Amino acid sequence: MWRNLGLKTYIFCFMLIFVLFGLYELSEYRFLTLVQQVVAEKNAHVVQKISAYLEPAPVIIKNGSKLIETNTGSLYNLDGLEAYFLKIIGPYPQFASFFVGDENGNFLMIRRDTAGFQTKIIKRSMSVPTVFYTDRDQDYKLINSSNSQVVDYDPRTRPWYKGAYLAGKEFWTDVYVFFSTQKPGITVSYPIYDANKSFKGVFGIDVELLSLSSFLTDQKINEKSKIYLLNDKNKVVAYSDMNEADLKKFPIHISEVSNKVLEDLISRNENVYEKNLAFSSEGKKYIACISSFPDSVGVYWKLIYIVPESHFTNKLKLFFIGAGLILLIFVLMFFAGNSRKDERFSFIK
């Protein structure tokens, strides 16, 4: 039956395949343009959500610092400040700890842990400097308390304290390893002054990288997409799917990240902070969007959203292949049916 279809039928089928291929190319171009817009919108949405995720921190430390400034004596009443910190840390699960250090090296920190909250108070004003520890459950009920005269921490030597003191205003640290948990993160801090504008101490809030990573992972379009947070020095602040093992490598520069796709993107767009683009790496095509954060957040970061082009085009290819095969089979059956009619008509004649 197929032998009798004739040359014209096969030429028609070839032309049909050629037209379908042309339609696919045109559709792919328009489809990828639409996908770029979707990725850009998703990127902007993630920037907005991370901004909302971090923006309470500067507000809290500024208000807390002003509150302490109006009653400077409260800075030296660490037990009273503990109650205040416990009230404000609860509604903000994205923050690992709240703390304050003064010019004499006294220190108060409320930190989240698996059981609930842990308080650490260092009183250097005592005849023998002492550290007091208090553990509470999720409902703030006392579990345990202890103290030690081994004082191995001085807030005045830490990046968050020095940075806020020198800046005289809100200060965001680079990625560094927290003393209390030995995990990397960032800190936003703010200086405290008395009524005479004399420096008295620093109020700060910690954000762990792993919590940022978990947040980024939840914002992914699909399993193959990647989201990176970079600071103004091209150091990785956090990225999606980061795990505990990755934490040991931080902080790291972008050149140290074992991801060729990200390296290729940054090497070509190192100074670009706002851009939607398509690029290739190791023979594969990707769609990316780079956006900077609004000034209101206080950090000079950029968010990089990378999605493999194949995630979208493979579905389009499958659609055209399926549609093409169905159409081709229909056309061949149509011509085959006409061929049989012609054979019967010839036989009758």
Image (cartoon, helix red, strand yellow):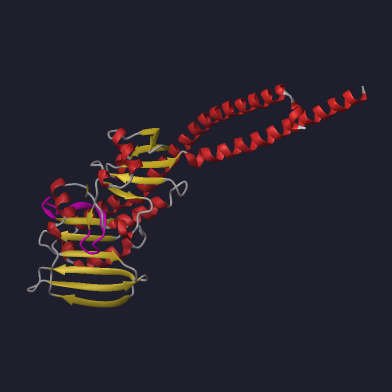
Q: Is residue 60 above or below residue 80?
A: above
What is the x, y in percent for residue 302? 32, 41
Asked whether residue 153 is drawn in magenta, I would say no
- The image shows residue 174, relative to residue 329, as above or below, that is below
- Farthest residue, direction left: 127
Q: Is residue 319 left or right of residue 10?
A: left
Image point (17%, 50%), residue name = 164
Given residues 133 and 235, the one toward you in this image is 235
In which quadrant will I find the C terminus? top right
Left-right relation of 41 to 213: right
Judge by depth and name the residue closer to the eye, 141 or 96: 96
Q: Where in the figure is residue 223, as x and y percent of width and height?
A: 46, 49
Q: How many marks?
A: 0
Farthest-out residue, right: 348
Image quadrant containing the N terminus:
top right
* Residue 269 at least partly seen: no
Which residues, given as a range, are shown in magenta? 178-200
Residue 146 x/y as whole percent = 21, 77
